[in-house]
Amino acid sequence: MKYHKLILLSLLLLTCGMAQDKPEQSEKALDDVIVKETFEAGTEEEKLPISLKADFSNLVEIPERIHWSSVEWKYNDGQPTTSLFQCNLSDPELTRIAPAPAKVFHLSFKDLASWKIDIFTSDGRNFRSLSGEGDPPPAISWDGLDNEGNPLIPGAHYSYSFTATDKAGNRRTFPGEAFTVPALYLVSDEEIWIGLANSTLFSPEGYGLTRDAAELSEELVSFIYYYATDENIRIRSQHPDTGKFLEMLAGKLGRSTDVFTQDSAPTVGNQCFMMWID
């Protein structure tokens, strides 16, 4: 009997020992699974952006600046023709041709009786004078016109001076730096004037048109679409490559160069290309 009891007790102790070892093995096995799954998930997440493929075949670049559906259509002898000069579109989109003012003078003077700004041409002629009583405003704008109302010459060199007179009558003149205006347009009740320096359109080495000529021609087309009410577009330019630029401009309009009227008046110094749109 004692022998059987000892065997039974040994079996019970062995069973309890095995029961205590099993949870540790299960816990270790579970930890291994969690670490492995986490690692695999992180690996897949890192690979995901690398395996992406982009398809840009459905993207289309639209360089036109005019919304063609707003252009009116006319019928001549039963054939539809586009009327380029009888519709008003959105404002012209411009990046190179700036509106007035042509230049802004920033001043900081106090206790003055009067002030004056004189703008001179390269040969010293007084082109425009701006003046006032008391202290000058912080910024004075020049519209680009001379004393008679004529526009400046784009690309030409100008200089200016500022004369200050204090309340005691003392006067002092401050000279300014020379400057040029490469592109400008002015709007009046009668017409639109656009001026471009020859250097912006024509190669100074005589190689024809510059790289900027195409972009500037698009801006001129935008002016014509927006402002022209009839086919009265005057051109003034004496550069030998003017015809090439007009051909480019007419091609963008879908017209012949006959749409432009050459102005016979000479361009001062042969420095610029001018256009008038009535």
Image (cartoon, helix red, strand yellow):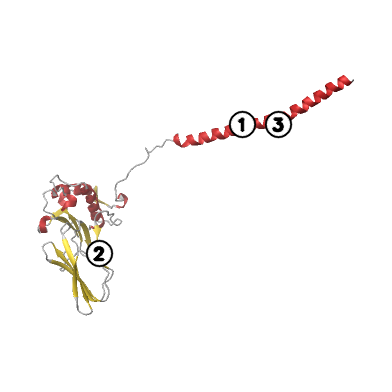
Residue on which disc 3 sits: 23
Q: Quarter holding the C terminus?
A: bottom left
In the depicted structure, whether residue 59 falls above or below residue 263: above
Asked if labels 2 and 3 touch by Cβ distance under 8 angstroms, the answer is no
Nearer-N-terminus badge (2/1): 1
- Mark 2, residue position: 104
User: Looking at the rendered structure, which numbered label has been put on residue 94?
Assistant: none
Residue 122: image location, x then y, percent: 13, 61
Q: Residues within 10 Å of mark 2 (few under 14, many from 20)?
A: few
Disc 1 crowd rating (10 Å Cα; few below 14, some 14-19, many 20+) is few
Q: Which residue is mark 1?
A: 32
| Residue 20 in the figure: left or right of residue 165 | right
* Foreground pick, 34 / 150: 34
Residue 130 image-quadrant placement: bottom left
User: Is residue 223 shown to the viewer in this render?
Assistant: yes
Q: Residue at x 69, y 31 (%)?
A: 24
Mark 2 lies on a secondary structure that is strand
Provide the secondary structure element on which disc 3 rests.
helix
Q: Determine the CA span between mark 3 and mark 1.
A: 14 Å
Q: Residue 7 in the image: x percent, y percent?
A: 83, 21
Marked residue nearer the N-terminal end (3 or 1) = 3
SS type, badge 1: helix
Local crowd size for mark 3, using a 10 Å CA cut-off: few (<14), some (14–19), many (≥20): few
> Residue 29, image x and y in percent?
64, 30
